Amino acid sequence: MSILSEWLDQTQAEEVECLVPDMSGIARGKIVPANKFLKGVEDRSLRLPEVVFSMAVTGDFVDESEIVSEVNTDILMVPDENSIRVVPWYDYSSAQVICDAVYTNGELVDLAPRSVLKRILKMYEENGWKPVVAPELEFYFVKKNLDPDNPLEAPIGLSGRKESGRQAYGIDAANEFDHVVEDIYDFCEKAHIDIDTMIHEAGPAQMEFNFNHGDPLELADQVFLAKRAVRQAAMRHDMYATFMAKPHANEPGSAMHIHQSIIDMETGQNIFATKAGKDSKYLLNYIGGLQRYVGAAMPLFGANVNSYRRISPYTDAPINTHWGHDNRTVGLRVPDSGPEARRVENRVPGADANPYLAMAATLACGLLGMLERRKATKPMEGDAYRLAFNLPRHQEMAMQKLNYCKPLKTILGERFVKNLMEVKNQEYDLYHKVISSWERENLLLNV
C-alpha cells in the first residue's frame, strides 16, 4: 500500500484537493474524490494545461505568449506524498496535497515555481551544501471590504473597538484577536504546519508568525498552506486576512523575511561561521551575492505593483542592500547568534511574494555570491535609511534589472524568467488601465 493510499485509508478523507502553486502563489489544481485521486495517480490522469503558469494574479492569461503554446499542453500533477495533509477548516474529512508539475516525459515543468526552487536546491547539493531557512510572515487582519474603491479598515477586536494606534509587540493588542489566532494555530496544528511564535507588529491589527527553521522546500510548502489557513480562519470571524505588501496607505507594509544559513553536507557544520565563531568567508561571499543580485531579483521579492509601496524609509522596510550585524534598517541583517545559528536575514521580500520564488531567488543570489566569490561591503553601522535607495522603486524598473542580469536569468532558468516577465508585463498593462481615486481627487477639476 502506498503512503498516499494508507494515509487516505487512515483519515477516511472523502476528497483530495490537488494543489499546484502558480506564478503568484495562488493554488491551482483539481478537487477529486479520494478513490479517483488514487486512480489518477496510478494511471497518470491527474492533469492540468501548462497555461496555468501563464496566468496573471487577476486570472487573465498572457496575450500572445512566446513561451506557453496557445494549444494547451497537458502536464501531469504528481503529488508529493510528504505534503499530504488534512484540510482543517472543513466539517468533513478532506485532504490537500501539493503536486509537482511534470511533463509527460517525466521532466519537471521548468515554469513551475516549485520546480525553480528544486533547481536551486539541486545546485547547492552538487556543491556539497544544504540550505536551511526560517521565514517570518507578516499580515493584517482587516474589516471585510466589498468595494475595492474604499480604503481598508482595521477590524473590530474582542473589546468591540478598532485598534487606533501602533502597538508593536503589544500583548493586549494581540489578545484582541485571540479568537482568530486560536483557530489559526488549531488549523496549522491539524495540517502539520510548524509555526512557532506570534507577535503583534507595528500596524493596526498586523501580526507576524515565525516558522521553525528547516528545509527550504518544506518551508515554502508550509508558507503556501499557512496563507490558506490564515485567510480561512479570519473569514470564520467575519474579517479578512491580507498578505498585501502595503494594504494601508499610512501604515507599515507586510514582509516575508527569510533567514538562511548553509550546512556542509559532509561535516554537518554551518559554513557561515569559522571554528573561532567569526563570520566566515562563505558568509561574506553569500552577502556579496545578495548585494549584487537582490535588485535584479526584485520581481520575485516584490511580485506585484503594490509591493513597491512598501519599500520606503522608516517604515520597517529596507530601501537598499547594505548589511549589518543586528541592524534592522538594512536590507541584509546578520542577527546576533552563536556559530551554529549564524545566518543572514533577507528583509527585502514582501508578504505577497510567492514563497517558492522568494526562497529560490534569495538562495540563488547567495549561491552566485559564493561561486563568484563576491566581496561584501563593510557592515553598516547606524541608520541605513540615511543612505540612498538602490532597490527598484517600481515594478517596471525591477523587470528591466532582471532582464539585463544574465547570471541570475541563467541560474533561475532562461525559459522561466521569460515566462515570468510575460506574466508581470501582463499585470502591469492591466494595472495601467485603472484610474485611481488619487487621480480623480487631484486631477478632475484642477488640470
Image (cartoon, rainbow, N blue to C red):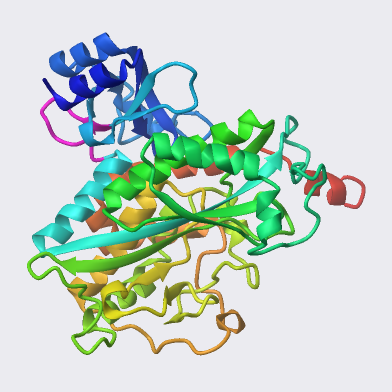
Q: Residue at x 29, y 46 (%)?
A: 218
Q: What residue occupies the far left of the structure in this picture?
A: 266
Q: In this image, 4 relative to 444: left or right? A: left
Q: Is residue 416 above or below residue 411?
A: above
Q: Residue at horizontal 57%, vertical 63%? A: 393
At x 26%, y 15%, the residue is: 37
> Would residue 375 be found to the left or right of residue 329 on screen?
left
Q: Nearer the viewer, residue 290 or 220?
A: 220
* Place of residue 266 in the rendered image (x, y in percent of width and height, measured from the top left): 7, 67
From the top left corner, tell me how far across and down residue 331 is, in percent. Answer: 48, 72
Q: Quadrant of the N terminus?
A: top left
Q: Quadrant location of residue 285?
A: bottom left
Question: Residue 102 at what x, y percent from top left?
Answer: 20, 30
Taking depth in this image into account, of 386 and 65 the one nearest to the observer is 386
Q: From what the image shows, is residue 96 above or below residue 135?
A: above
Q: Position of residue 351 (x, y in %)?
A: 51, 51
Above or below, 363 relative to 14: below
Magenta region: which residues? Answer: 99-110
**Image quadrant where residue 147 sits:** top right
Near-viewer residue (342 or 375): 342
Q: Is residue 406 visible?
A: no
**Image label count:** 0
Please identify the quarter of the rendering in which residue 369 is found. bottom left
Asked if the magenta segment contains residue 109, the reply would be yes
191 in the magenta segment: no
Regarding residue 40, the answer to whether it shows in the image is yes
Q: Is residue 287 above or below residue 381?
A: above
Dominant secondary-structure state across the stretch colored magenta:
loop
